[in-house]
Image (tube, coloured by chain):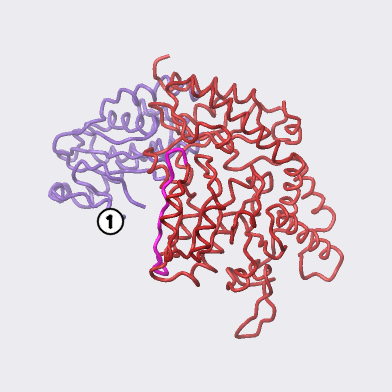
Amino acid sequence: MELKQLYREIVNEHNLHPSHKKDIADPTMVLNGVNPSCGDDITLQLSVKDGRIADASFNGSGCAISQASADMMCDLIIGKPLEEAKQLSADFMGMIRGTATQEQIEKLDEAAALSDIAHMPARVKCAVLGWRTMSEMVDKLNAEGPQEATAAGSSECGACADNSAAVCKKNCTSRRCG
Amino acid sequence: MSSYREDFPIFKGSDVIYFDNAATSQRPRQVIEAMRSFNDSCNANPLRGLYDWSVRTTDAYEAARHAVAHFIGAERDCEIVFTRNTTESINLVAYSWGLANLHAGDEIVLTVSEHHSNILPWQMCARRTGARLVYMECEKDGTLPASEYESKITDRTKLVAVAEVSNVLGAVNPIREIADVAHRKGAVVLVDGAQSTPHMPVDVKALGADFYALSGHKMLGPMGIGALYGRIALLEEMQPFLTGGEMIETVTRESATFAPVPEKFEAGTVNAMGAVGLSAAIDYLNGVGFDTIMRKERDLTGLLLDRMRKMPEVTVYGSEDPAKHCGIVTFNIEGCHPHDVASVLDSEHICIRAGHHCAQPLMKYLGVSSTARASLYFYNTEEEVERFADALTKVRGWLGYGA
């Protein structure tokens, strides 16, 4: 798809009128993802119940592609089991790398429209920001277990005090240092 | 259309508008021909060979050193050290001069508008020596007020490191005045000349620079060749930056003595072909003349600023005066992220830079996370400026803001 057409038909709508750019009540986990070189900065919130993503949202700022991609991702993963969401993230990365099958790409629904980003190396990191943050969250939830993650939910964000810890349990807009 | 444009093969038959000259400039065929002629006639390892080709390579390399010295007003050729680029030149000073001469309690004075390459080496020095970084703040248009350098350069200041021209705002810093204050306080002055050497005549003596760094690729030369000017007295007392071949006098199993300046700082086989290209670039710039270059840039910048002023959605950073931009026009379009702006312009075959321009402290100071930057050079044309401005008026529409 030609770039201006991609913006016109897909990206602009999700960027200017996102459905999921908001806070959700009582998130299970909140994680900040940044592209330091572009200033894209999103905070993804997931509410997980019985191993399923009951709700998902994001906040933050960035280019239209990073914002639209995160919004489309939220559309797609709400209601999905954690493992399926993680697989969708892997499929999205695969699509950008050009290794995904047609079947995998079709499962990405509207986000499949971003496949042409593969030809724009400078924009790849914008498109994948939300997806890689979500995948990281699923890994953390699996490692810590939902209970621990919930328990840790009361702690303040250590993102800026500790460059290595970007896990924030509150709705923090601070960005990862460094 | 400018006749100089004919000298640049990349523009031939292309509709691409190249407005990213502050990142790197294009090369005229004269530069490539000089490098090809060197390659085809005498390429050998310089300095050591006892045969004709090596001697001629050495001569070509040293002639290039002389050309650089003359270009920036250095008194002696040995005050010019060839490096890869401005970044390496500044790092050479940071490691060889900074670590040996800075101590806890000393202050390094910079401006908030410095490129990262003139910030990070000093952060390294500060971490290792206990010296402190002090920032001079510019006005929003990039002007550095006298009160800043008069108050922040003190008896504690050991080094003042400042760019001659900001790579974001295009503002020219008052180097002579800053150096006068610094020298009165006994401080050493390093000038980052990456953005000034392509656009204006430079005289390191008149500026009062103790060190001066430049990159060949920003001034029509090839990538991978740059230079450091250092006052001979400073260079002579400094330890080598890198060690190895070509920079020694004698080596025993346990120790070595070093070659004199500048070879002391040029370890390993040097980029002789790059130096030849840089020398040809200097010849080319001198042939065009800085009067012409500055007039052309001012006219093109003036035209662009006039067009942009008529676009209420566009914010331009920097001076109102086109002569104070060095061809650099940094801007934002309301509601549009600069990366999206650059991408849609790319689909119109227009090359601009978007992001933080390796100047994050300045971005923070300006209160923006990123900006778009169009940077012009003398070979650009009015027609290109008009086409670019026409495209700018459509960007918001392409990004979904009304029609």
Q: Label 1 is placed on what type of residue? A: Asp
Closer-to-camera residue (A1/B279):
B279
Q: Is residue A14 left or right of residue B222?
A: left
In the picture of the structure, the residue carrying the numbered disc 1 is A162
Question: Vertically, is A147 above or below B300?
Answer: below
Residue B135 among magenta residues: yes
SS at badge 1: loop
Percent coordinates x, y for residue B386 in the rendering? 59, 22
Who's purple, chain-wise?
A: A
Residue A98 visible in the snapshot: no
**Residue drawn 62% across and 51% down?**
B215
Residue A62 visible in the snapshot: yes
Chain bearing tag 1 is A
Who's red, chain-wise?
A: B
Q: Quadrant of residue B30?
A: top right
Q: Is residue A102 left or right of residue B93?
A: left
**Residue drawn 73% across and 29% down?**
B2
Question: Vertically, is B84 above or below A60?
Answer: below
Point out the stretch of residues depicted in magenta: B127-142
Closer-to-camera residue (B388/A74):
B388
Percent coordinates x, y for residue B129 in the rendering? 42, 69
Closer-to-camera residue (A12/A110):
A12
Most extreme residue toward the top, as rendered? B403
Percent coordinates x, y for residue B272 in the rendering? 73, 58
Most extreme residue toward the right, as rendered? B52
**Residue drawn 49% across and 49% down?**
B115
